[in-house]
Image: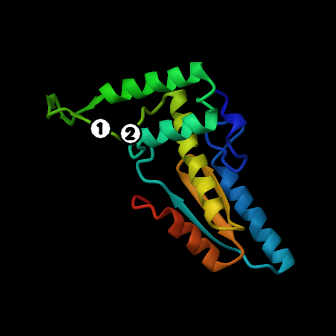
């Protein structure tokens, strides 16, 4: 599955040529435009805490199924199902030194360091971006993995964007 088919250009994480400084570059360009035109600019920037650990896998697979057209792509639907089954059997545990605590099943977290994990993260970020844009006209969200920002011509527009997502795990 090629994420370039469904990933918005404002989301630069995990794709060729994307860098964290893309957020700052575009923020700087928006500031320059506001200064030159005399127009207002309001924004918010935030970082999702424990990004890979806080992902709800059921949401990821649901978003990916819709974005990828899994309903008509049996091969990809089977792949998503195999991934869901893998994560369903995954158990977590707490280790201190050589000792292990009790193991448990978890509905959150995805593997870090795996290339497919970036597609998982990008699917949730794409869902975040589309949702905010559907709720707040004129909002301009951008993201690089867990680093996210939104800008609007009015303070209330930014507040509406923040209210629309109301994260509980932002730092």
Question: In the figure, 106 relative to 146: above or below?
Answer: above
Q: Which residue is mark 1?
A: 106
The answer, for residue 16, to whether it is visible in the render is: no
Residue 31 vs 63, above or below: the answer is below
**Residue 144 appears left or right of 166:** right
Label 2 Cα crowd, 10 Å radius (few <14 / some 14-19 / many 20+): some
Query: Going by the image, does 22 lie left or right of 32?
Result: left
Is residue 136 at all visible to an observer of this figure? Answer: yes
Q: Nearer the viewer, residue 132 or 158?
A: 132
| Residue marked by disc 2 | 109
Figure check: 12 above or below 113: below
Q: Mark 1 falls on what kind of element? A: loop
The numbered dot on residue 18 is none
Colour logic: rainbow
Residue furthest toward the top?
75
Q: Are marks 1 and 2 in contact (CB under 8 Å)?
A: yes
Quarter where residue 122 is shown: top right
Classify residue 102 by image quadrant. Answer: top left
Question: Circle 2 sits in a helix, a strand or a loop, which is it?
Answer: loop
The one of 170 and 21 positioned closer to us in this rendering: 170
Percent from the top left, x then y, of residue 117?
50, 33
Front residue of this view, candidates 82 and 8: 82
**Residue 60 percent across, percent down from the top left:** 49, 40
């Amino acid at each position: 599955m090629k994420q370039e088919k469904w990933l918005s250009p404002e989301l630069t994480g995990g794709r060729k040529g994307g860098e964290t400084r893309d957020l700052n570059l575009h923020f700087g360009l928006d500031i320059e435009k506001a200064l030159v035109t005399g127009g207002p600019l309001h924004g918010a920037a935030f970082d999702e805490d424990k990004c890979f650990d806080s992902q709800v896998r059921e949401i990821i697979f649901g978003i990916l199924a819709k974005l990828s057209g899994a309903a008509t792509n049996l091969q990809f639907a089977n792949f998503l199902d195999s991934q869901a089954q893998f994560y369903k059997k995954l158990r977590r545990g707490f280790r201190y030194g050589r000792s292990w605590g009790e193991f448990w099943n978890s509905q959150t977290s995805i593997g870090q360091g795996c290339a497919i994990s970036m597609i998982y993260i990008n699917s949730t970020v794409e869902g975040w971006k589309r949702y905010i844009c559907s709720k707040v006209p004129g909002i301009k969200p951008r993201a690089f993995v867990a680093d996210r920002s939104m800008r609007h011509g009015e303070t209330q527009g930014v507040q509406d964007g923040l209210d629309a997502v109301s994260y509980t795990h932002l730092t």
